[in-house]
Image (cartoon, rainbow, N blue to C red):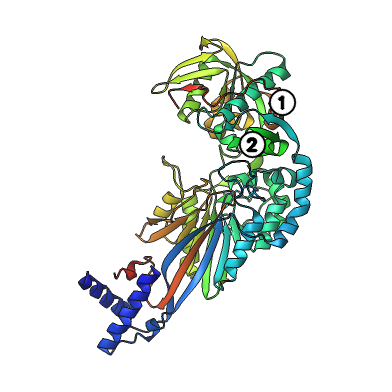
Amino acid sequence: MKQNSVKYLLLFIVLFGQACSSWNLQSIEPTYYKIDSLGVDSSIQAMTLPYKQHIDSVMDVKLVDLPLDLTKNKPNGNLGLWMADACRANAARKLNRSVDVALLNHGGIRRPYLKKGPVTLGMMYELMPFDNLMVVLTVKGRLLKDILEIAEERGGEPLSGAIVSVKEGISQISIDGADLDLNKEYTLVANDYMYNGGDGYAVLQNGSKPEYLGLIRDALVEEINLTAEFPSSGTLRWIGHE
Amino acid sequence: MSKNRRNFIKQASLLGMGMGMLPLTAWAKSEEKRLVILHTNDWHSRIEPFPMDGGRLQGQGGAAKRAKLIQQIREEGHEVLLLDCGDIFQGTPYFNVYGGELEFKLMSEMGYDAATLGNHDFDGGLNGLKKQLPHAKFPILCANYDFSETELAGKFAPYKIVDKGQWKVGILGIGIELDGLVPEALYGATKYQDPIEAANKYAALLKQEKNCDLVICLSHLGYKYSGNKISDQVLASQSENIDIILGGHTHTFMEKPDEIKNKIQSPVTINQAGWGGVILGRLDLIWTKGKTAAKAHNSMLKVS
């Protein structure tokens, strides 16, 4: 150890013993500050205030008292499952016919939870800040299977109307209690982000001509008051993929 | 580390005196200067702290608290660089209602030196972004998006050279592939170009031709992925003239910076600061006076 030290020292002296003229980067020391219980900068606060007052007046509107915690989790988080339920119900309401399956993208859920208790409009904007649209398509069972396979490869996604069993890939798809029929036509609701190829779902374009049904966020705001039963935290729609 | 250094300097001085012939006075004085880099990423319009609703991040973050902290750090008296790695926009009603205006105004007030573009900074479309640019009093850098066919042509420089004290710092920006991540209707005719090629081209320009002391890449590629997807780690390993990559997109909370060897086996430091403005990242670059470029961080100081 000591020998080594001396060697390093000598090396150092050889390298640096001459005129010391320039500055050299010797080390990088990291710090991560948690922005937690700190004081506030008054000028930033003053700049923010008029914006905040307007936002609060529009967004601090209570929509519902949520009876349970909804949590974002892959693949069976009940927040995503509820969002899929809500889109399916809302599309069915708008179309005045049944919708078989809703599939959303997990990455589009932008709030990790909605807690039991009051839910405001502002929280719904945080949950779904994007102006994504609901897209309704008619798809053959074969195509629906392809679409669900993409979802499975992505670790499962918010799903309503179907239960998918997974064992080294998809082993079974059940729609409304019956096995998926590869030749039957199904009504699917997704979002325009996915339809346009987002998150690898370009295959959606192989279905029927799309029908757009308004903003996903608006659908969620409408449905949160109308939802009779929220998915409980143990609900499984991806089985074997938990 | 600094303890080691003090130790070393003491030993070196004693040794020097003992040998009675080496000009170590500069070392005995322990000339040392700091350049402080502060950085954020994926702020996502979190102007206010996360709400007190029992969530994991409740009460954390908030622009007014961040500004206060930055001010306190500036008062330490070192040269400070304040940088952001994109996804400034989208995530709270502040963006839905005001389109990013307040985010840019607050960052300008805090004195950001530069930022890069994240995928969500396109969420208001090219026109939405263009409308907010006058509120940003700092340059937004991107070296691998070609905006020449869009209404944003000429709005984003690939790099910027910032003089901080005696240091000339080259900063460049690198964005993530937009296709499949951002709706085409929003990014329009923006063309994504190879990030490694662009980063290496501009880093070489900054280091070799413009003689920058330091080259920092602001990246929104993401820290690392399980597949072959280009990430900060991949960029670091295939780069040549970048010293530090500050990242975003993957919302990574790091315990310490990563260090990756580049193409010529020099270390590249990678850092990221969580998301939502709940972390302010800080790197203290400690420079000492000497002739040799001791870019291998700390490697000369292993004495104990």
What is the spatial separation of the Cα atoms under label 2 and label 1, in whole angstroms?
Answer: 16 Å
Where is the C terminus of chain B found, in terms of image quarters? Answer: bottom left
- Image: B281 above or below A152: below
Q: Nearer the viewer, residue B39 or A121?
A: A121
Q: Residue at x 49, y 16 (%)?
A: A173
Q: Nearer the viewer, residue A76 or B91?
A: A76
Q: Pointer 1 indicates a residue of which chain?
A: A
Task: Place residue A117 in its image quadrant.
Answer: top right
Task: For marks 2 and 1, give the one nearer the viewer.
Answer: 1
Q: Amino acid at mark 1?
A: Asn
Mark 1 lies on a secondary structure that is helix
Discs 2, 1: same chain: yes
What residue is disc 2 on?
A127
Task: Place residue B79 in its image quadrant.
Answer: bottom right
Whether residue A136 is visible to the viewer of this picture, yes or no, is no
Q: Nearer the viewer, residue B129 or A159?
A: A159
Q: Give the left or right position of residue A186, taking residue A165 as reference.
A: right
What residue is disc 1 on?
A225
Place of residue A42 in the rendered image (x, y in percent of width and height, measured from the top left) = 71, 61
Q: Give the left or right position of residue A76, taking residue A169 as reference.
A: right
- Image: B185 above or below B284: above
Residue farthest along the left direction in this orientation? A3
Place of residue B74 in the rendered image (x, y in percent of width and height, measured from the top left) = 59, 69
Place of residue A171 in the rendered image (x, y in percent of width and height, measured from the top left) = 42, 17
Task: Place residue B38 in its image quadrant.
Answer: bottom right
Q: Amino acid at mark 2?
A: Leu
Place of residue A136 in the rendered image (x, y in percent of width and height, measured from the top left) = 65, 22
Q: Pointer 2 indicates a residue of which chain?
A: A
Mark 2 lies on a secondary structure that is helix
